[in-house]
Image (cartoon, rainbow, N blue to C red):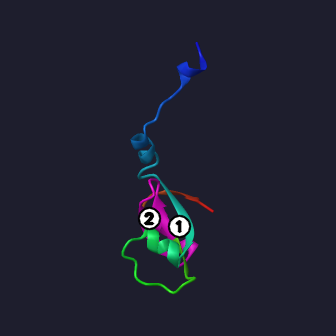
Amino acid sequence: MTANDNKITITPQQLAHIGQGAVAYMREMDAAELKAKFPGVPEMAPGLRLWALFAANGQPILLAEGRDAALAGAFQNDLQTVSLH
């Protein structure tokens, strides 16, 4: 038996679905970053920082003024959260 015999292959499509419906990540972002991630977001003051909640595949879920509000949104949707820095 070689090391390659135990190798698991995951397709990009399978990888995109890992954690789907179960895991979300939170990130504090400024107005410029938010505009790129949330199409159609209204104009915001430069430097404004909000917390964003994203699905495991990167799909935006919600915006909140504070970390606690974003966390509450995750819990309401039965999502386990992780933070990115």
Mark 2 is surrounded, within 10 Å at the Cα level, by few (under 14), some (14 to 19) or many (20 or more) other residues, namely few
Residue picked out by circle 2? 76
Residue drawn at (45%, 68%) of the image: 37
CA–CA distance in space, label 1 to label 2 = 9 Å
Q: Nearer the viewer, mark 1 or mark 2?
A: 1
Q: Is residue 56 magenta?
A: yes
Give whichever of discs 1 and 2 has the lower sequence position. 1
Residue type at the position of mark 2: Gln
Where is residue 21 shown, x and y percent of the image?
41, 52
Residue type at the position of mark 1: Leu
Residue picked out by circle 1? 71
Quadrant position of residue 13:
top left
Mark 1 is surrounded, within 10 Å at the Cα level, by few (under 14), some (14 to 19) or many (20 or more) other residues, namely many
Count the numbered circles shown. 2
Q: Which residues are magenta?
A: 52-74
Where is residue 31 shown, x and y percent of the image?
51, 78
Q: Residue furthest right?
A: 85
Of the 4 image quadrants, the one containing the N terminus is top right
Residue 42 disc label = none
Q: Nearer the viewer, residue 77 or 51?
A: 51
Residue 9 falls left or right of residue 28? left
Q: Residue furthest bottom?
A: 45
Per the image, label 1 sits on a secondary structure element best described as helix
Where is residue 78 shown, x and y percent of the image?
45, 58
Q: Is residue 82 above or below residue 28?
A: above
Residue drawn at (43%, 47%) of the image: 16
Per the image, label 2 sits on a secondary structure element best described as helix
Q: Is residue 44 magenta?
A: no
| Label 1 close to label 2 by CB (< 8 Å) | no
Of the 4 image quadrants, the one containing the C terminus is bottom right
Where is residue 72 shown, x and y percent of the image?
50, 68
Q: Is residue 41 above or below residue 78?
A: below
